[in-house]
Image: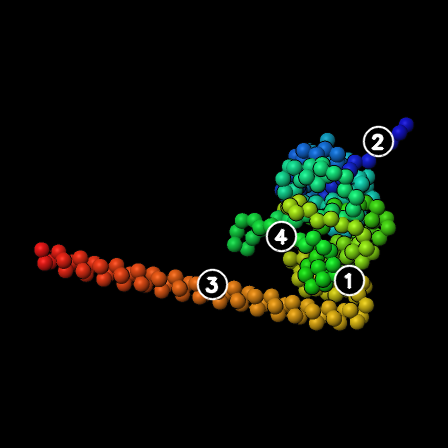
């Protein structure tokens, strides 16, 4: 008996005790108009009702399990082993696809022939609402060494990459996905940037909660992939990039202050003019 054909995409969702976010994630996948996909859910023995949310949608899942694990990357590796799709996308609980036509836009028009397909992401804006984070068209070392790289919510990975390059490094607690994407870039794997949002990224994960560990793990990963001489250049370039970023921020703040001062002066001139015309009008009325 022939095995069923592998789907184009495997979504992998890992979760632990985020029932509300998990429900939103699962529903955003179920709503996709492009139907050649499967969904794998790895739950870390949740006790908050997450399993009820999974069971309620089990008819749309290719595989799910709820059992203890040692962290998010062990769970993601379990998802990779269960996945059958040509591409794998990691959409963890609390994140969701940007709209119901995302897969149609990624895989509908033409057959992609690259190892990494990546789009942009949506995330909460500091001033409220949502902003789009646009990633560069070219993936270079500078994208990772100086900036923050590309978050996994934006990326569709060829599943075979994990067999060739290895799975996520479970000794890393925050940066294993960053490490894997960097491995793919160093190995010269092909990529294509899609100029539209793929997913909404909640931005409240481990990296936001523990920035000191993030910085330590980033340094560990860069030491693995960069020769010592290049790493020293990276440290210098990073310092210059941070200084440029600080100067740009200061320039924007000074521009805001200057514009506010101009606006204040205009308001004062308007008040003075209005008072001047009121006095003239009262004087004219008094002469009638």
* Location of residue 140 with respect to 14 vertically, above or below: below
Quadrant assignment for the C terminus: bottom left
Q: Residue at x 56, y 66 (%)?
A: 248
Label disc, if present, on residue 256 of the rendered structure: 3
Residue 48 seen in this snapshot: no
Verify CB contact (< 8 Å) between mark 2 and mark 3.
no
Residue 207, x across and y down, in percent: 67, 57
Q: Earlier in the sequence, mark 4 or mark 3?
A: 4
Residue 171, x across and y down, in percent: 79, 58
Q: CA distance from mark 2 to mark 1?
A: 39 Å
Q: Residue at x 83, y 56 (%)?
A: 187
Verify CB contact (< 8 Å) between mark 3 and mark 1.
no
Circle 1 crowding by C-alpha within 10 Å: few under 14, some 14–19, many from 20:
some
Q: Which residue is mark 2?
A: 4
Q: Earlier in the sequence, mark 3 or mark 1?
A: 1
Q: Earlier in the sequence, mark 4 or mark 1?
A: 4
* Location of residue 56 with respect to 184 vertically, above or below: above
Q: Which residue is mark 1?
A: 221
In front here: 42 or 236?
A: 236
Q: CA distance from mark 4 to mark 2?
A: 38 Å
Circle 4 crowding by C-alpha within 10 Å: few under 14, some 14–19, many from 20:
some
What secondary structure is marked by label 2?
Answer: loop
Q: CA distance from mark 2 to mark 3?
A: 60 Å
Q: Residue at x 67, y 35 (%)?
A: 32
Q: Which residue is mark 4?
A: 133
Residue 282 seen in this snapshot: yes
Q: Earlier in the sequence, mark 2 or mark 1?
A: 2
- Of circles 3 and 1, which is in front? 3
Q: Is residue 156 left or right of residue 123?
A: right
Q: CA distance from mark 4 to mark 1?
A: 24 Å
In front here: 282 or 235?
A: 282
What secondary structure is marked by label 3?
Answer: helix
């Amino acid at each position: 008996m022939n095995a069923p054909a592998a789907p184009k995409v495997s979504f992998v969702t890992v979760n632990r005790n985020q029932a509300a976010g998990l429900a939103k994630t699962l529903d955003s996948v179920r709503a996709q108009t492009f139907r050649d996909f499967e969904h794998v859910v790895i739950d870390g023995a949740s006790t908050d009702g997450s399993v009820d949310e999974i069971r309620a949608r089990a008819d749309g899942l290719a595989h799910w399990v709820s059992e203890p694990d040692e962290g998010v990357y062990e769970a993601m590796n379990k998802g990779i082993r269960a996945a059958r799709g040509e591409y794998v996308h990691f959409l963890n609980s609390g994140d969701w696809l940007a709209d119901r036509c995302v897969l149609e836009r990624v895989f509908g028009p033409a057959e992609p022939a690259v190892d990494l397909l990546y789009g942009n992401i949506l995330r909460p804006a500091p001033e409220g609402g949502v902003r789009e984070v646009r990633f560069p068209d070219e993936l270079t070392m500078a994208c990772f060494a100086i900036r923050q790289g590309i978050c996994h919510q934006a990326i569709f990975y060829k599943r075979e990459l994990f067999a060739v390059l290895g799975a996520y490094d479970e000794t890393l607690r925050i940066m294993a996905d960053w490490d894997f994407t960097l491995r793919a870039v160093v190995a010269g794997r092909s990529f294509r940037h899609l100029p539209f949002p793929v997913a909404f990224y909640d931005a409240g994960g481990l990296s936001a909660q523990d920035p000191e560990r993030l910085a330590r793990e980033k340094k560990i990963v860069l030491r693995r992939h960069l020769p010592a001489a290049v790493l020293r250049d990276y440290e210098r370039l990073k310092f210059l990039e941070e200084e440029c970023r600080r100067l740009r921020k200061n320039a924007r703040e000074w521009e805001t202050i200057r514009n506010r001062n101009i606006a204040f002066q205009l308001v004062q001139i308007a008040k003075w003019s209005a008072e001047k015309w009121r006095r003239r009008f009262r004087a004219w009325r008094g002469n009638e």
